[in-house]
Image: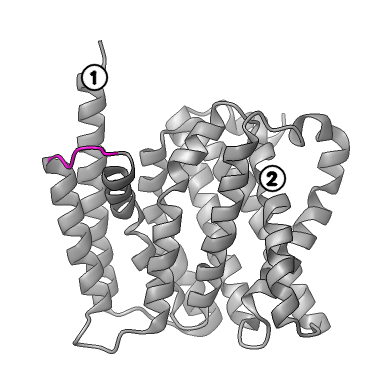
Amino acid sequence: MTAIQMISRWPPTVQCAFWVIISGVFMTLQLAAVRMIVDDVSVFEIILFRGLFGALVMAPMLIRKGSILLRPNRPGLIWLCGTLAFIANVFFYLSAKHLPIADITAIHFSRPIFAAVVAAIVLGEALRGSRILAIGLGIVGATIIIRPGIIDVNIGVLYVLGLVAVQSFNPINRKLLSRSEHPDTVAVWNILTILPCGLVFTLFFWTMPTPVQLFWMALIGVMELLNQRVIARAYVQGDAMIVVGFHYTRLPIAVVVGFMFFGESPDIWIWVGALVIAAAAVILAKGENRVQGDKSP
């Protein structure tokens, strides 16, 4: 029995939690690898080489299952996901240049709060009591972490907020794709969409990478491909809000990685703000589940 087959026997929520935690490890290690080279290589070049190395890794899979993976059922939605992923990665990698890993992770926790605001504005969904409370708490938590006026606002904070704003659209897109696409199809097309985007911008910021920089970019590409495959499986096993909720396991992972690689130690306010934002997300998730239950026959 393979590891995938063994995991498939677990309850869906346990599978979802497992895949999200593994995704958190890949994302955090990827961020650490970006930190190693981002001062000398543009983020667009990192994204381009990440896509190239990811494409090399997935080549055997495409040879075996290309007839399935290269024919998405919803190409427009899958291209939109890839384009948003490219924009999000630009913000993500730029933030790595200016902020500790734990700070990036903690501020990133505000994503479900942004998603609620996006749903209200774009989809015209009502701002019910639970959503209003969650949004208010999310703002308080983010303010505790950023502390504008008390400490200088780092430009990296703006990059993370840009990342969160872009990613707020993707949980819905991912869940829709999970109903019509194989999980690996999403991972493959994520790379196939990012590659041309990265190439266009790299032309303006090209520098010849060293062998060491190529090693780090290859590692980033492999981890991103693996991350796309595992997070797609998480969305198959759990609702979008459940997936987002499990993302809070990333803070302790980020703290460990930041300390091991860069000697970073987050201050107490990072933890306090992250807990407030997590509480907001729990309130939001419970409110959404209650509404869905009321709509059920």
Q: Quadrant of residue 3?
A: top right
Where residue 54 appears, as percent x and y from the top left, is 75, 57
Where residue 230 appears, as percent x and y from the top left, is 59, 44
> Is 127 one of the magenta-colored residues?
yes
Identify which amino acid the numbered label 1 is placed on. Answer: Lys
| Above/below status of 235 relative to 211 | above
Image point (15%, 42%), residue name? 130
* Main SS of residues in magenta: loop
Q: Which mark is residue 189?
A: 2
- Helix, strand or loop at label 2? It is helix
Residue 26 vs residue 280: left or right?
A: right
Q: Which residue is mark 1?
A: 295
> Is 145 one of the magenta-colored residues?
no
- Alpha-carbon neighbours of circle 2 within 10 Å: few (<14), some, or many (≥20)? many
Q: Which mark is residue 207?
A: none
- Name the quadrant of the N terminus: top right
Image point (22%, 82%), residue name? 148
Residue furthest top in the image = 297
Residue 17 vs residue 275: left or right?
A: right
- Helix, strand or loop at label 1? It is helix
